[in-house]
Amino acid sequence: SNFGSSNQPSAVKMRQTLDLLRVQAPWLEVDGEMHGDVALDGKQRAAVMPHSALAGNANLLVFPNIDAANISYNLLKTAAGGNIAIGPVLLGAAKPVHILTASATVRRIVNMTALTVADANAER
């Protein structure tokens, strides 16, 4: 869905998530549900959605379910080259916890360990 073009449950979930983000973290630069190509390409988004609140390319993507997140994460990781990635990042757990897959490189293990340590030391 692009900004309300669908009323499927996953699109509605993303609109509700946006409403929560705007209330709970108003300082974040966020925008509504949109196709991945439009999110990742700021020039394309400016052309087709000139009223978007985002400037430039998105650097964080939120997905309606774990299946969409896993598929997109692996596609982006592969397209970026070098199998260098941060993630997946789990949110909402009582303690810092993240996932490493069997394909994780040493660099990704180090990156995710550093992220987990930073999470553990962050004030909550």
Image (spheres, grey):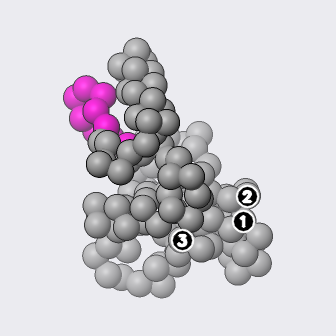
Residue 36, numbered label: 3
User: Is the C terminus in the top left, top right, bottom left or bottom right quadrant?
Assistant: top left
Q: Position of residue 121 (x, y in %)?
A: 40, 15
Q: For residue 56, which quarter of the picture?
A: bottom right
Query: What amino acid type is highlighted by mark number 3?
Result: Gly
**Can you identify the residue that label 1 sits on?**
42
In space, the residues marked 2 and 1 are separated at their CA atoms by 4 Å
Question: Of helix, strand and loop, which mostly describes the magenta segment?
Answer: loop
Q: CA distance from mark 3 to mark 1?
A: 11 Å
Where are the magenta residues, as a range?
Answer: 89-98
- For the residue marked with disc 2, what is the amino acid? Gly
Which residue occupies the foreground of this view, 109 or 67?
A: 109
Q: Nearer the viewer, residue 10 or 108?
A: 108
Q: Position of residue 41 (x, y in %)?
A: 68, 68
Please say whether residue 92 is visible from this viewpoint.
Answer: yes
Count of numbered circles on the image: 3
Please indicate whether residue 80 sits to the left or right of residue 67 in the image. right
Q: Which residue is mark 2?
A: 56
In front here: 91 or 104? 104
CB of mark 2 within 8 Å of CB of mark 1? yes
Q: Are marks 3 and 1 in contact (CB under 8 Å)?
A: no
Residue lying at 59% horizontally and 74% vertically, measured from the top left: 37
Would you say residue 71 sits in the magenta stretch? no
Which residue is at 72% across, 65% downward?
Answer: 42
Left or right, residue 97 beside residue 4: left
Instruction: Name the quadrant containing residue 49.
Output: bottom right
Q: Residue 101 placed where, x, y %?
A: 30, 48
